Amino acid sequence: MDKIKIKNLVNGAIEENSSLFLIELNFLPDNKILVVVDGDKGISLKECVRISRAVEHNLDREEEDFSLEVTSPDIAQPLIVKRQYKKNINRTLQVKLIDNSKIEGVLKNVDENAIDLEWKVREPKPVGKGKITVVKNKTIPFKDILEAKVKLLF
């Protein structure tokens, strides 16, 4: 299987829509090709079919049998590429850091090197009894993130 040709076909099909981006391209056993694509505003089934056809119609099944799956990312899977973080600004993320600590907060900003999270906590009042709600912020470099997932809220 010509992996370079397939990669070029996938990239060419994705480039036809500037809001789309490749998350994953895997060549699995038994000549299975898995393509995971996302978009800045999600990806429609129609776009997945278009990408699949663009790849399939340029490969010869007589030459080599294969199966091709073009899909959107699973919401329960960790974020992989930085563009996924940008897509999820103002959503709640669960972030596991390389020191195995965890932070949950609303994604407020993404740049080339880090993300900014914001969350609220109840803390004792500086003076007197009771608690107050305090807004906390933290900038987390990408190099410190082991895994980040969008928290599903129902």
Image: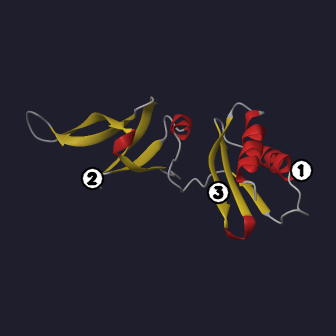
Question: Tag 1, which secondary structure?
Answer: loop
Q: Which picture quadrant has residue 141?
A: top left
On screen, 62 above or below 114?
below
The residue lying at 54 percent from left, 56 percent from top is 76
The residue lying at 51 percent from left, 52 percent from top is 152
Residue highlighted by disc 1 = 57
Q: Residue furthest bottom?
A: 30
Q: CA distance from mark 1 to mark 3?
A: 19 Å
Type of the residue with mark 1: His
Question: Tag 3, which secondary structure?
Answer: strand
Q: Which picture quadrant has residue 63?
A: bottom right
Type of the residue with mark 3: Asn
From the viewer's side, name the closer residue of 78 and 119.
Answer: 78
Q: CA distance from mark 3 to mark 2?
A: 29 Å
Residue highlighted by disc 3 = 26
- Assess disc 1: are there few (<14), some (14-19) or many (≥20) residues with their C-alpha within 10 Å of its C-alpha: few
The residue lying at 72 percent from left, 40 percent from top is 11
Query: Given this view, does label 3 or label 2 mark the residue nearer the observer?
Result: 3
Question: Tag 2, which secondary structure?
Answer: loop
- Percent across and percent down for residue 107 are 44, 37
Q: Which picture quadrant has residue 28?
A: bottom right
What mark, if any, has residue 99 been given in the picture?
2
Q: CA distance from mark 2 to mark 1?
A: 47 Å
Type of the residue with mark 2: Asp
Instruction: Specify how the rendered protein is coloured.
Output: secondary structure
From the viewer's side, name the closer residue of 65 and 97.
Answer: 65
| 2 or 1: tag closer to the N-terminus | 1
| 3 or 2: tag closer to the N-terminus | 3
- Assess disc 3: are there few (<14), some (14-19) or many (≥20) residues with their C-alpha within 10 Å of its C-alpha: few
Q: Residue furthest left?
A: 127
On screen, 110 above or below 57?
above
From the viewer's side, name the closer residue of 117 and 146.
Answer: 146
